[in-house]
Image (cartoon, helix red, strand yellow):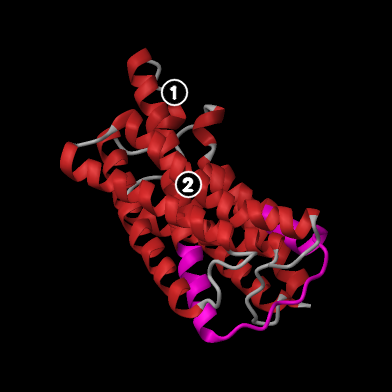
Amino acid sequence: MIVHFYTPLAILCYLIATGLLVRPLLNAGPPLTKPAMAAALVAVLLQLAVSLGLHRGALDLHFFAALGLVAGTMSALTVLVNMARPVAALGVIVFPLTAILLGTDVYLAPATTPLQIDWQIKLHVTIALLAFGVLLIAALLAIFLSMQERALRRHRFNGWLRVLPPLTLTEGLLFKLIGAGFVLLTATLITGALFVDNLFGQHLVHKTILSILAWLVFGALLFGRWRYGWRGRPAVNLTLIGMGMLMLAFLGSKLVLELILHRVN
């Protein structure tokens, strides 16, 4: 079966990519970024084939399947972003996490049946996944930015931090990702209002409210950056607060409903 053939290959490629990037942590030299990104790209394509085979081309949004989709989206975005900016350090976290979540979905998670949804909802969910992935990468960059600033203050710039672009470029990329994520999150809320029945229904009210609050946080951050030049600690804190709200909206609610209450939302 295609799933059992491609899954271990995808996991192996993700781990190879991680190993090629982790060299500075082991004092084994600089990261081999290009081979690592090539291996990650192969892994992403294999994961796509696994997802199509495992769920028969349908969009499965159950908890572990959704986690795998988010992680795969993040890995794909990491490869794409690295084409414009050297942010290979993201892969040290994203690629092994994706390998773990892919393995969990295929080998450990209970079998699920994808819900039958029309193209409008698929569009809404696809935009939401992209928004979530972009903003989650921004949150990781915010953490790296905080670590870079702390290292510079203490004059302890460890080898693996050198994988990141200079601090000013990291900060610029952070706000570009937040801007892109904000646009996608706006589109998510608009398509939700247009296509989702009873957006403030029992199972969706918390998602909707938390998503709107996250949208306000990211909007305030972008306005503050434009109007007042916000940067550093305020930018990091607001990015993590907004991302925390989105994680509660998406993953937190699915965790409680599906794994604790055994209900499908």
Q: Position of residue 30 (x, y in %)?
A: 44, 36
Residue 227 among those drawn in magenta: no
Q: Which residue is mark 2?
A: 243
Contact check, label 1 and label 2, Cβ < 8 Å: no
Q: Quadrant of residue 198?
A: bottom right
Q: Is residue 252 left or right of residue 225?
A: right
| On-image quarter of the C terminus | bottom right
Q: Position of residue 263 (x, y in %)?
A: 77, 64
Q: Amino acid at mark 1?
A: Asn
Out of 143 and 265, give the one closest to the viewer.
265
Magenta stretch, main secondary structure class = helix
Mark 1 or 2 closer to N-term? 1
Residue 98 circle label: none
Distance Cα–Cα, label 1 vs label 2: 27 Å
Q: Residue at x 73, y 67 (%)?
A: 264
- The residue segment tinted magenta is 101-130
Q: Which residue is mark 1?
A: 158
Where disc 1 sits, the SS reads: loop
Residue 127 among those drawn in magenta: yes
| On-image quarter of the N terminus | bottom right
Q: Position of residue 214 (x, y in %)?
A: 43, 50
**Does the image show residue 88?**
no
Give the answer, above or below, for where 51 lies relative to 83. below
Q: Amino acid at mark 2?
A: Met
**Does the image show residue 160?**
yes
Out of 38 and 44, give the one closest to the viewer.
44
Q: How many marks?
A: 2
Q: Residue furthest top?
A: 154
Q: Residue at x 67, y 83 (%)?
A: 116
Q: Is residue 22 left or right of residue 58?
A: left
